[in-house]
């Protein structure tokens, strides 16, 4: 692989935050979505994924009163740690995502599955633009949401070198969630080797530019890693911007990425002070230390 898994996870978190921040004007209230970082802390504290504890940690599906774009952002943030932890196994990834997605809305469910699949494939460095829409369709399975059809339409536009402005004219103006997913998919696939171009294109979305930027930034960050993010961009992330995703400092994000990779690979973290999990009961931290190669000993 061109980049380490740790660097790709760092890129996922910072990429999503940057994509959102770039689209936020000084007159807008910032969007807060801290579920991704909280979920990662839970994985570290548990030494792996525990559905019972996850259900206690995650709030119930009480976001139905939120606007569709914010509901989408919250749902994806909540599911993102699962995508990071099960990125190498599509069966377990889909199974656990379906267990953790609280919404019964097929459109929201399929949007989360789409984004998490793209993040997982980016972490695996297995992005094939020619087959990506078909892969997502298979991953989603039988559905009535229309997202697979929308992604195939976008894929055809990309194949025909259709510009982003023309794409916006082809989108269904009545369905903001599918618009966001289609736009983010287009921006990433069309410029997948360039994080900067992906984000700048995503924030030009006619509607919901901040959510579209966050999604496209997270996917591109997973694919291009921290090495692909302009250093001047992430140096501009101050405490206020980091707080929007539940981070207190840039170094905390680095430690969280290191720790979640350690847990994923079978090395259970035993020094909670270094990963700043104050919000989580320290009794949940495993008192044992175990080290193993990936695929040999792993808590599932």
Image (cartoon, rainbow, N blue to C red):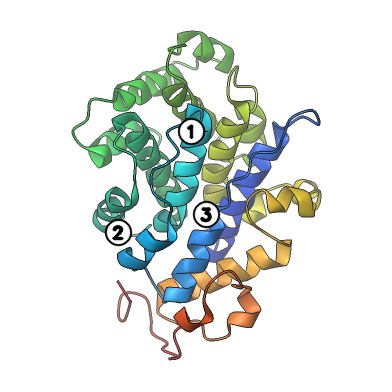
The answer to the question of whether label 1 and label 2 lie on touching residues, with beta carbons closer than 8 A, is no
Q: CA distance from mark 1 to mark 2?
A: 22 Å
Image: 176 above or below 143 = above
Density class for disc 3 (Cα within 10 Å; few <14, some 14-19, many ≥20) is many
Is residue 93 left or right of 62 when viewed as pictured?
left
The residue shown at (21%, 37%) is: 141
Residue 222 horizontal/vertical position (percent): 53, 51
Q: Is residue 73 visible?
A: yes
| SS for callout 2 | loop
Nearer the observer: mark 1 or 2; the answer is: 2
- Residue 1 is at least partly visible in this image: no
Q: Is residue 250 above or below residue 13?
A: below
| Chain-order first, disc 3 or disc 1 | 3
Image coords of residue 135 (percent x, y): 29, 38
Q: Which residue is mark 3?
A: 36
Dot 1: what SS?
helix
In the rendered image, the vertical position of residue 248 relative to residue 229, given as above or below: below
Q: Tell me which residue sits at (42%, 50%) in the image.
A: 79
Q: CA distance from mark 2 to mark 3?
A: 20 Å
Find residue 89 and name its label.
Answer: 2
- Dot 2: within a 10 Å radius of its alpha carbon, few (fewer than 14), some, or many (20 or more) residues? few
Q: Give the residue pinned by disc 1.
A: 189
In three-dimensional space, the C-alpha distance between marks 3 and 1, rounded to whole angstroms, equals 23 Å
* Front position in the image: 265 or 243: 243
For image coordinates 64% across by 27% down, the residue present is 203
Return the disc, 1 or 2, that comes first in the chain's sequence: 2
């Amino acid at each position: 692989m061109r980049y380490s898994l740790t660097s790709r996870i760092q890129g996922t978190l910072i990429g999503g935050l940057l994509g959102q921040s770039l689209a936020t004007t000084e007159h807008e209230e910032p969007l807060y979505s801290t579920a991704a970082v909280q979920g990662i802390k839970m994985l570290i504290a548990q030494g792996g994924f525990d559905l019972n504890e996850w259900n206690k940690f995650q709030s119930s599906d009480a976001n139905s009163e939120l606007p569709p774009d914010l509901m989408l952002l919250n749902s994806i943030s909540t599911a993102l740690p699962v995508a990071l932890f099960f990125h190498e196994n599509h069966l377990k990834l889909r199974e656990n995502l379906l267990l953790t997605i609280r919404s019964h809305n097929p459109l929201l469910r399929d949007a989360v599955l789409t984004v998490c699949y793209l993040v997982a494939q980016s972490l695996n460095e297995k992005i094939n633009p020619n087959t990506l829409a078909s892969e997502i369709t298979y991953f989603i399975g039988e559905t009535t949401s229309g997202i697979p059809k929308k992604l195939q339409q976008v894929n055809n536009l990309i194949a025909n070198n259709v510009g982003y402005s023309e794409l916006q004219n082809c989108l269904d103006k009545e369905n903001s969630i599918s618009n966001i997913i289609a736009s983010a998919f287009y921006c990433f696939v069309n410029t997948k080797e360039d994080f900067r171009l992906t984000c700048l294109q995503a924030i030009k979305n006619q509607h919901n530019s901040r959510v579209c930027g966050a999604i496209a930034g997270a996917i591109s960050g997973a694919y291009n890693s921290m090495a692909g993010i302009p250093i001047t961009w992430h140096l501009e992330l101050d405490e206020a911007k980091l707080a929007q995703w539940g981070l207190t400092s840039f170094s905390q994000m680095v430690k969280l990425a290191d720790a979640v990779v350690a847990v994923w690979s079978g090395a259970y973290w035993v020094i909670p002070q270094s990963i700043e999990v104050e919000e989580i009961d320290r009794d949940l931290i495993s008192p044992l230390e175990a080290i193993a190669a990936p695929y040999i000993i792993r808590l599932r």
